[in-house]
Image (cartoon, helix red, strand yellow):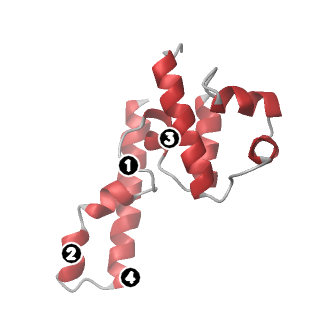
Amino acid sequence: MVQSESDRKAFADRLVKAAAFAGYKGRGVGADLAELFDVTPKAVSKWVNAETMPRRGKIDEMAKTFKVDRQWLEYGVGTMEDGVSDIKGLAGIVEMGLSPESLRELEDHARLLKLKENSQGQ
């Protein structure tokens, strides 16, 4: 799939932000990411300079590693933190006296629903 220059630039910005969120920033980050994702430093350079975008499988791996939402990383949809977009809508439930355990169960359920939606959309 061919991406527009603006799509590549937006992805590159999100990639750098996600890497920093996960603690990968500063000098040598390109080499760190290359090693982390088993690619060449040139590939990482192309991603962060908006020359190319990684394949979907690599984006999935990045999202899991950085603990960010895949839809956000790839498309800029939703929020950066994995699961946050689903959970923010449940914030009022905590005020109703929901236990932390029950809230975690709801978070897990929301993630499962998101996975189901993603698999049906592909």
User: Badge 4: few (under 14), some or many (20 or more) residues near its Cα, within 10 Å?
Assistant: few
Mark 4 to mark 3 CA distance (whole Å): 28 Å
Mark 4 to mark 2 CA distance (whole Å): 13 Å
Residue linked to disc 2 = 93
Q: Callout 2: helix, strand or loop?
A: helix
Q: Are marks 1 and 2 in contact (CB under 8 Å)?
A: no
User: Badge 1: few (under 14), some or many (20 or more) residues near its Cα, within 10 Å?
Assistant: some
At horizontal 49% and vertical 43% (from top left) the residue drawn is: 70
Q: Mark 1 or mark 4, which has the lower sequence index?
A: 4
Q: On the picture, is 61 further left or further right than 39?
A: left
Along the line of sight, which residue is nearer the eye, 77 or 119? 77
Mark 1 to mark 2 CA distance (whole Å): 20 Å
- Numbered badge on residue 35: none
At horizontal 80% and vertical 40% (from top left) the residue drawn is: 38
Seen in the picture, residue 25 relative to 53 is either above or below; the reply is below
Mark 1 to mark 4 CA distance (whole Å): 20 Å
**Closer to us: mark 3 or mark 1?**
3
Residue linked to disc 4 = 101
At horizontal 33% and vertical 55% (from top left) the residue drawn is: 85
Residue linked to disc 1 = 114
Q: Position of residue 1 (x, y in %)?
A: 54, 15
Amino acid type at mark 1: Lys
User: Badge 2: few (under 14), some or many (20 or more) residues near its Cα, within 10 Å?
Assistant: few
Q: List the single residue furthest toward the front.
A: 27
- Numbered badge on residue 73: 3
